[in-house]
Amino acid sequence: MEILTPDIARYLDGLADRPSEFREMERIAESTNFPIIGPASGQLCYLIARMIGAKRIFELGSGYGYSTAWFARAVRENGGGEVHHVVWDKDLSERARKHLDKLGYTDLVRYHEAEAVATLRATEGPFDLIFNDINKRDYPASIDVITPKLRRGGVLIIDNLLWSGRILDPSDTSEDTEGVRAVTRRITESDEWVVSIVPVRDGVLVAYRK
Ligand SMILES: C[S@@+](CC[C@H](N)C(=O)[O-])C[C@H]1O[C@@H](n2cnc3c(N)ncnc32)[C@H](O)[C@@H]1O
């Protein structure tokens, strides 16, 4: 199920101003069927990072660097800092280096070819913003590692929390769908967060750490 009608999704994507290399990365995603956050969600991430003046950002599940590019753009405009790109696929990490180099963000990005939650555990915090886009079954357990690494007043963004509407199908009890449901309950029922799920593309959870 598409959350937005195709016309509305296209309209929102069209409002996101971005460099041509971003568009090239979008074309690659389309032709290879790779799940990037896309322009409207990317713009939302960029906006949030700009609004909180983020200088230290950690991404879990970075792909070939499309979401990283939006965060690096924000960090550059915030006066510089670092964005951690973490993916366990060597090929994706290498491709990300090429795209982000073309965009002029190499000095801002720290690359890790490794499992994302373990890498965050081993990296010194605090971060202003943490973005989570790993395998959905691993979302719930990641929160125990993420929370202490995020500064108070920082923002956690988690992608795919509407999961193409599968969360509403009681017969879907797959590990990934249950992971999305569990992390949603965990964050929305906790007193530690102020939270909203923004229904852009596949649903973007935005949580402010009180
Ligand atoms: C949805 S894609 C990332 C898309 C990227 N955030 C973007 O929007 O451009 C998730 C990627 O993270 C990798 N991945 C999933 N779980 C991971 C984990 N626990 N540690 C490291 N990489 C992971 C997947 O193999 C995949 O390449």
Image (tube, grey):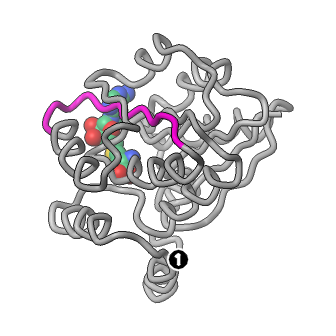
SS class, disc 1: loop
Taking depth in this image into account, of 94 and 74 the one nearest to the observer is 74
Region rendered in magenta: 80-91
Residue lying furthest top:
122
Q: Which residue is mark 1?
A: 4
> Is 36 left or right of 160, judged from the image as shown?
left
Residue drawn at the location 44% of the way across and 42% of the way down: 133
Q: Quadrant of the N terminus?
A: bottom left
The quadrant of the picture showing ligand 1 is top left
Q: Position of residue 179 (x, y in %)?
A: 52, 36
One can see residue 116 in this view:
yes
> Is 151 left or right of 60, judged from the image as shown?
right
Q: Quadrant of the C terminus?
A: top right
> Against 127, is 157 above or below?
below
Decide whether residue 61 is among the magenta residues. Answer: no
Residue drawn at the location 71% of the way across and 36% of the way down: 154
- Quarter of the figure with residue 188: top right
> Is 26 left or right of 133, judged from the image as shown?
left
Q: Position of residue 206 (x, y in %)?
A: 66, 49
Residue drawn at the location 29% of the way across and 44% of the way down: 63
Residue drawn at the location 62% of the way across and 42% of the way down: 54
> Against 123, is 74 above or below?
below
One can see residue 135 in this view:
no
Q: Position of residue 93 (x, y in %)?
A: 22, 36
> Is 150 left or right of 114, judged from the image as shown?
right
